Image (cartoon, rainbow, N blue to C red):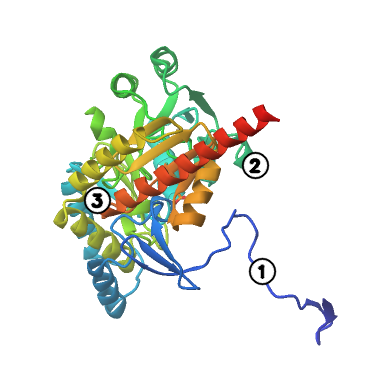
């Protein structure tokens, strides 16, 4: 309803509402511990989605809660105008645990920003403006990140002047023909494509890309925002192929729910003061969260744990009925069925309180916290087995019914 205010201005008395841009379940979660979540009606859920691959060390991990609480009581934030020793501690730990010793870390707040800074920096350094990206890629929703994302539905005319070429993830010839031209500032590729349904380039593709980037002076950017931080059993997924990237971007699991992202630069990639910057990037709370995550990953040996749990899941999923394809590594798994994956996801939620993820076209996506137990894995497999067996029997009965009538 609109009324006339005292200063003669029209006032809209409706309540402000959220912009309705997300597909949401009609469930509000209020508590989390490990993999277990509780909704406002105290119904329990088991989290095999990690809030989109964000919860790396489990909900409310005690070390995380303690570190963040201590930092909150000391100093929540001060800007990059002053020294922040926590940033150095985080960079040191990250270099040590990822094997990217000597790299330089730029901190920001989201995956899109990490990629935006990587792409911009590559262009600043090479003086080139075109980017080479991979078909099916998702790199975020800011102008540069969305331009290298292979989905026209989420692009706007604004930013459409950015020059990007897309190549298939499985064609060495396609890769060679484009990258050999020396026209690209950067080649950007996800460690494993997540939003596209868990697809990875093979080892030869990664090695050829590395070779050509070096030969042509193209910056090699590995987007590890979803596949990084131990999720696949290596610190970064591209390390399975034995290649080294010039720039690596991280986000999601880095802060276990606290918004923090990073862009790691090879030391030869020089940027002058003032060339990159952000107000919130690398604030004290963000650093405390990210440090706590790295310490837990190391203390609890979550890389090897993710590998073991992933091997178990991949083996067991492959034995289930109606499964037509299983892809992935460690705890980043995509599953296709001969029935709708969306339906399987809904049944897991409705009948077993198990939360999973989804990717078009019709892939069930598993991105649990790395701290999950064998028992959690068995619960998922048992729920899938029951769901798929029931669906298979129902379909058989329906078919038999159709034949009889
Ligand atoms: C591989 C990859 N890159 C970038 C992003 C964007 O991250 P954010 O949503 O934090 O901006 C995502 C998010 O899903 C992602 O999966």
Q: 104 and 235: which one is in front?
A: 235
For residue 284, side relative to residue 278 (left or right): left
Residue 234, x across and y down, in percent: 23, 40
Label 3 and label 2: CA atoms lie apart by: 45 Å
Which residue matches tag 2?
Answer: 156
Q: Residue at x 54, y 30 (%)?
A: 163
Sooner in the amino-acid sequence: mark 2 or mark 1: 1
Which residue matches tag 1?
Answer: 17
Label 3 element class = helix
Residue 19, x across and y down, in percent: 65, 61
Q: 9 and 321: which one is in front?
A: 321
Can residue 298 be seen from the camera position used here?
yes
Which residue matches tag 3?
Answer: 374
Image height check: is 86 above or below 145? below
Q: 273 and 153: which one is in front?
A: 153
Label 1 element class = loop
Image height check: is 234 above or below 300? above
For residue 36, side relative to residue 304 (left or right): right
Can residue 143 be seen from the camera position used here?
no
Q: Which of marks 2 and 1 is in front?
A: 1
Sooner in the amino-acid sequence: mark 3 or mark 2: 2
Image height check: is 354 above or below 60? above
Q: For the residue carrying disc 1, how many other residues have a C-alpha within 10 Å: few (<14), some (14-19), or many (20+)? A: few
Q: Nearer the viewer, mark 3 or mark 2?
A: 3
Q: Nearer the viewer, mark 3 or mark 1?
A: 3
Task: State if disc 2 and disc 3 touch (CB < 8 Å).
Answer: no
Pick the quarter of the image with the C terminus.
Answer: top right
């Amino acid at each position: 309803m609109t009324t006339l205010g005292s200063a003669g201005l029209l006032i809209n008395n409706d309540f402000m509402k959220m912009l309705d841009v997300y597909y949401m379940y009609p469930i509000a979660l209020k508590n989390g511990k490990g993999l277990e979540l509780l909704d406002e009606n105290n119904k329990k859920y088991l989290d095999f989605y990690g809030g989109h691959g964000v919860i790396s060390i489990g909900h409310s991990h005690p070390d995380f809660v303690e570190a963040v609480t201590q930092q909150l009581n000391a100093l929540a934030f001060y800007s990059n105008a002053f020294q922040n020793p926590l940033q150095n501690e985080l960079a040191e730990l990250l270099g040590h645990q990822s094997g990217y010793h000597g790299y330089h870390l730029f901190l920001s707040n989201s995956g899109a920003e990490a990629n935006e800074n990587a792409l911009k920096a590559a262009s600043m350094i090479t003086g080139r403006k075109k980017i080479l990206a991979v078909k099916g890629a998702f790199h975020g929703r800011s102008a540069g990140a969305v331009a290298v994302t292979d989905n026209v539905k989420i692009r706007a005319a604004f930013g459409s002047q950015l020059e990007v070429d897309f190549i298939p993830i499985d064609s060495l010839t396609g890769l060679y023909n484009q990258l050999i031209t020396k026209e690209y500032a950067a080649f950007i590729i996800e460690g494993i494509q997540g939003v596209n349904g868990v697809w990875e380039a093979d080892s030869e593709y990664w090695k050829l890309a590395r070779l050509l980037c070096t030969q042509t002076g193209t910056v090699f950017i590995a987007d590890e925002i979803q596949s990084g931080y131990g999720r696949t059993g290596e610190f970064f997924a591209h390390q399975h192929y034995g290649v080294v990237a010039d720039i690596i971007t991280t986000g999601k699991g880095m802060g276990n729910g606290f918004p923090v992202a990073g862009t790691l630069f090879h030391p030869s990639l020089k940027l002058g003061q003032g060339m990159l910057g952000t107000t919130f990037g690398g604030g004290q709370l963000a650093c405390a969260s990210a440090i706590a995550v790295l310490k837990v990953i190391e203390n609890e040996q979550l890389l090897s744990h993710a590998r073991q749990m992933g091997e178990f899941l991949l083996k067991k999923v492959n034995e289930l009925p109606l499964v037509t394809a299983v892809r992935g590594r460690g705890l980043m798994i995509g599953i296709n069925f001969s029935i709708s994956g969306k339906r399987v996801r809904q049944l897991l939620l409705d009948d077993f309180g198990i939360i999973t993820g989804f990717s078009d076209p019709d892939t069930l996506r598993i991105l649990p916290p790395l701290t999950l137990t064998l028992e959690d894995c068995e619960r998922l497999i048992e729920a899938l087995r029951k769901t798929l067996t029931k669906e298979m029997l129902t379909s058989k009965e329906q078919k038999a019914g159709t034949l009889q009538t």
